[in-house]
Amino acid sequence: DSGVTQTPKHLITATGQRVTLRCSPRSGDLSVYWYQQSLDQGLQFLIQYYNGEERAKGNILERFSAQQFPDLHSELNLSSLELGDSALYFCASSDRVEIAGGPGERELFFGEGSRLTVL
Amino acid sequence: DQQVKQNSPSLSVQEGRISILNCDYTNSMFDYFLWYKKYPAEGPTFLISISSIKDKNEDGRFTVFLNKSAKHLSLHIVPSQPGDSAVYFCASNFGNEKLTFGTGTRLTIIP
């Protein structure tokens, strides 16, 4: 058990709909990352939050958005869903404090993922 | 642009033998390398890492080798056990950048 909790584990919805995926990081972790894993693909970085603020953005579509709340949990919102959005969405957290110019986030602790199926 | 590449989608190894998983990277700024293991229906779990100041790091049955000049790293598992059957991802980053992952190699250990 990594200590990172993701809900829901499975979600089936239709094209055009909107869903919200939720993540609770490990206790004390300030950084939350979202990754997408499509079929036969690696883990594609979507977005990172650090202590409530967006820190880095990857290949995240404009139809997707995220936020991190004061209690440090995070939500990933996916709207106007398309068939190609079907994937596993992983949340990860890290306990390393970012230091300007210092070593970056290293080991990430992943949740079990949310499997989204768009029909 | 795939900065971290795992060119073997799958690998089968006899139980007790050595498993060698390979990973290549293109970004010469990467200075930290990690291996993650993933079972079905679970999230990836951290396995072992290596800093660019080293060329080898060992943890029990797992050893990671880094060849900076070739931009290549490998994970050796000796001896391989049935519980090692999983998908293995290599990942890398530098500074405060996010981790960049490879596409994974599915390792199957044959009893």
Image (cartoon, coloured by chain):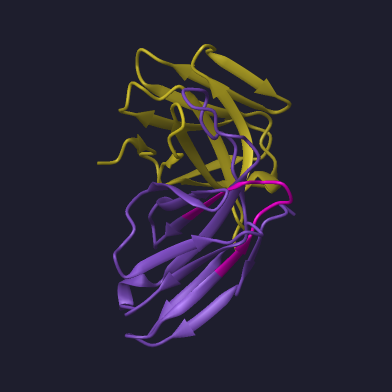
Chain colours: A purple, B yellow
Q: Check if residue A23 falls in the magenta segment.
A: yes
Q: Quadrant of the N terminus of chain B?
A: top left
Question: Can residue B18 be seen in this snapshot?
Answer: no
Q: Residue at x 39, y 39 (%)?
A: B6
Q: Position of residue B67 (x, y in %)?
A: 43, 15
Give x and y (percent) for residue A103: 52, 25
The structure residue drawn at horizontal position 65% and vertical position 55%, both measured from the top left corner, is A25
For the residue pair A35 and B84, the one nearer the viewer reads as A35
Foreground residue, A86 or B17?
A86
Q: Residue at x 36, y 21 (%)?
A: B71
Answer whether residue A5 is magenta in the image: no
Q: Where residue A100 sits: x, y (%)?
A: 49, 27
Q: Is residue A43 above or below residue B100?
A: below
Question: In the figure, A1 relative to A11: above or below?
Answer: above
Which residue reaches farthest left?
A: B1
Report whether B41 appears left or right of B28.
right
Q: Please, is residue A8 above or below residue B42 in the view?
A: below
Magenta region: A22-34
In the figure, residue B36 lies in which quadrant?
Answer: top right
> How many dots with numbers?
0
Q: Nearer the viewer, residue B67 or A62?
A: A62
Asked if one can make out residue B62 in the rendered structure from this viewpoint, the answer is yes
Which residue shows up at 35% across the image and 49% down it? A58
Residue B57 image-quadrant placement: top right
Residue with the most extreme front position: A70
The picture quadrant where one finds residue B64 is top right
